[in-house]
Every structure is written in structure tokens, then in C-alpha cells.
Amino acid sequence: MKIRTGLGYDVHKLVEGRELWLGGIRLDYELGLLGHSDADVLIHAICDALLGAANMRDIGYHFPDTAAETLNVDSKILLRKTVDLIATKGYRIGNVDATVCAERPKLNPHIPEMQRCLSDVMQTDIDNVSIKATTTEKLGFTGRMEGISAYATVLIEKD
Ligand SMILES: Nc1ccn([C@@H]2O[C@H](COP(=O)(O)O)[C@@H](O)[C@H]2O)c(=O)n1
Ligand SMILES: C[C@@]1(CO)OP(=O)(O)OP(=O)(O)OC[C@H]1O
């Protein structure tokens, strides 16, 4: 079996007047993430990790933020298309491990639903999808609640 790893990182700004989408679900919160798409920073980091593992460039290469089709797009659609892209090279997901850096909201209560949602979109076992959260102890842009960032690592495999 051939295995490869990939790393993804993304940041989106927190603003008023936008919905907060994270890990494929909408969270009830007074601020939301700004982007051309729904700005689901966690999904974007996972897409980049998958594309990187398969050496297939990055999310903006495949889904440009200048395209009308990606305006306000549900990032779950981009994730599904990314899984299909790596499948063209014969790869399937081994596992995903991600960390969201956010001072607020508290994400722990929502993580099982994110895992269910993303494993369903990626058509992989829920045990293959790990999501974690951390504050940055009020330091930096995430600590000042100016934005949310996310890191993801993945392992992809083929026979
Ligand atoms: N937005 C967040 C941030 C953190 N958590 C959980 O709290 C734990 C402690 O966070 P520290 O940044 O102080 O290490 C962290 O391990 C998460 O379990 C959270 O749910 N939502
Ligand atoms: C997802 C895309 C495309 O809609 O737009 P954004 O929501 O701006 O997200 P980003 O992570 O900045 O870049 C990837 C883009 O191509």
C-alpha cells in the first residue's frame, strides 16, 4: 500500500453580519467568518491537506475566489469535489486530524456533529476524522477574536 501525508492551514476574518460555518455545520454565534465562500476555515484546511498529500496544488487553484460558482458556496461541496479529485489519482482517505484555533465560541459540544458531518461528506468512517479546538490564550489575531484559523493533517492511501 502507498501512503502519503498532507498539511493544510487556513485563516478567515471574524465579522458581524455573517453566519458562522465550521466543520460543515452552522454555529449559533454573533460573529461569522468572511470569505468568498461560506468561509468554513476548517473544511478549507482539510481540502488543502488532501490536495497537498496528492500533490494536486491547493483549494484556490481548483476553486478560485474569483469564480461566480464559488460565491457563497457551501464548503462541503468543495470538500466532496476534493475527495473526488484525489480519487482520480487512486487515493482514498486514511485519516484526518485537525485543530481549530478560536478564542470563542466553545467548540467542544459541537465536535461530534462536525465529525459526523465531515465523515459523511468524505465517505469515510467517523473514526478517521479527528477534530480538536484550542484557544491561543488571548494572544495574536485569534486571541483578539479578529479571526479563526485551522490546521489539518491527513494521511491518504492507495493499494
Ligand atoms: N474554541 C474552543 C477552544 C478550546 N476548547 C476546548 O478547551 C480546551 C482548553 O483550551 P486551551 O486553549 O485553554 O488549551 C481545549 O483543549 C478544548 O477542549 C473549545 O472547546 N473551544
Ligand atoms: C474557498 C474559496 C473559493 O470560494 O474562497 P474563500 O471562501 O475566500 O476561502 P479561502 O480559504 O480564502 O480560499 C479558497 C477559495 O478559493
Image (cartoon, rainbow, N blue to C red):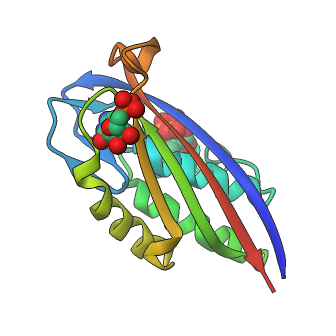
* Residue drawn at (54%, 36%) of the image: 10
Q: Where is 71 relative to 82, above or below? A: above
Left or right position of 38 against 153: left
Q: Position of residue 32 (x, y in %)?
A: 26, 32
Q: Where is 49 relative to 128, above or below? A: above
* Residue drawn at (24%, 38%) of the image: 106
Q: Position of residue 115 (x, y in %)?
A: 38, 64
Q: Is residue 151 visible?
A: yes
Q: Is residue 65 visible?
A: no
Q: Picture quarter containing residue 116?
A: bottom left
* Residue drawn at (58%, 43%) of the image: 64
Q: Where is 99 relative to 146, above or below? A: below
Q: Picture quarter containing residue 25?
A: bottom left
* Quadrant for the C terminus in the image: bottom right
Q: Where is 22 relative to 158, above or below? A: above
Q: Position of residue 101 (x, y in %)?
A: 43, 33
